[in-house]
Image (cartoon, rainbow, N blue to C red):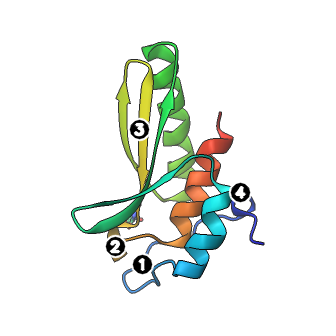
């Protein structure tokens, strides 16, 4: 079983392989309540984190920002009063890469 939080992201490149269904099936149980969604025909991982106020939501957002700069892999983040919605996918391959599962697991670990 691949430990997702122990991995680091590969460099995003055009032509990198999409995550296989076997990998998706292996990785999803390691994530905490992330959803597989498809937006504009692109598969993504999405989760909304709840907070008591905007300040805590923003603090969590900034932690994600530091993590994604460190890993060189970036999400879409919607920061609202009491909520942060994080969406992971790989832009260059217009879909899910193992990187996205690594980053979703590391996002959970920020809490
Ligand atoms: C030049 C830069 O490294 C690349 O554009 C990286 C930046 N972060 C990225 N993040 C995501 N989610 N997908 C990418 O394809 C991607 N590419």
Graded by Cα atoms within 10 Å as few (under 14), some (14 to 19) or many (20 or more), the crowding at tag 4 reads some
Ranked by sequence position, the earlier of labels 2 and 3 is 3
- Separation of marks 1 and 2 at Cα, in angstroms: 6 Å
Q: CA distance from mark 2 to mark 4?
A: 22 Å
Task: Name the residue: 21% across, 63% down.
Answer: 40
Q: In the shown orientation, is residue 5 left or right of residue 74?
A: right
Quick one: label 3, few (<14), some, or many (20+) residues within 10 Å? Answer: some
At mark 2, the secondary structure is helix
SS class, disc 1: loop
User: Label 1 neighbourhood size at 10 Å, few (<14), some (14-19), many (20+)?
Assistant: few
The residue carrying mark 1 is: 13
The numbered mark, 2 or 4, whose residue comes first in the sequence reads 4
Relative placement, left or right, of 21 versus 109 is left
Task: Give the CA distance from mark 2 to mark 3.
Answer: 21 Å
Q: Position of residue 83 (x, y in %)?
A: 43, 26
Provide residue 12's location: percent of width, then percent of height.
Answer: 45, 72
Tell me the element at label 3: strand
Q: Are marks 1 and 2 in contact (CB under 8 Å)?
A: yes
Image depth: mark 4 or mark 1 in front: 4
Q: Is residue 60 above or below residue 19?
A: above
Q: Classify mark 3 as within 8 Å of ligand 1 or not, answering yes or no.
A: no
As helix, strand or loop, the secondary structure at mark 4 comes to helix
Ligand 1 closer than 8 Å to label 2 CB: yes
CA gap between label 3 and label 4 equals 20 Å
């Amino acid at each position: 079983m691949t430990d997702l939080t122990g991995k680091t992201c590969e460099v995003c490149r055009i032509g990198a392989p999409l995550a296989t269904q076997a990998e998706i099936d292996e990785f999803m149980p390691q994530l905490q309540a992330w959803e597989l969604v498809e937006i504009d025909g692109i598969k993504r991982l999405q989760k909304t984190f709840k907070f008591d106020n905007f300040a805590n939501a923003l603090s969590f957002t900034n932690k994600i920002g530091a993590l994604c700069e460190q890993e060189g892999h970036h999400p879409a983040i919607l920061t609202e009063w009491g909520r942060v919605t994080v969406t992971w996918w790989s832009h260059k391959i217009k879909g899910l890469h193992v990187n996205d599962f690594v980053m979703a697991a590391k996002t959970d670990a920020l809490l």
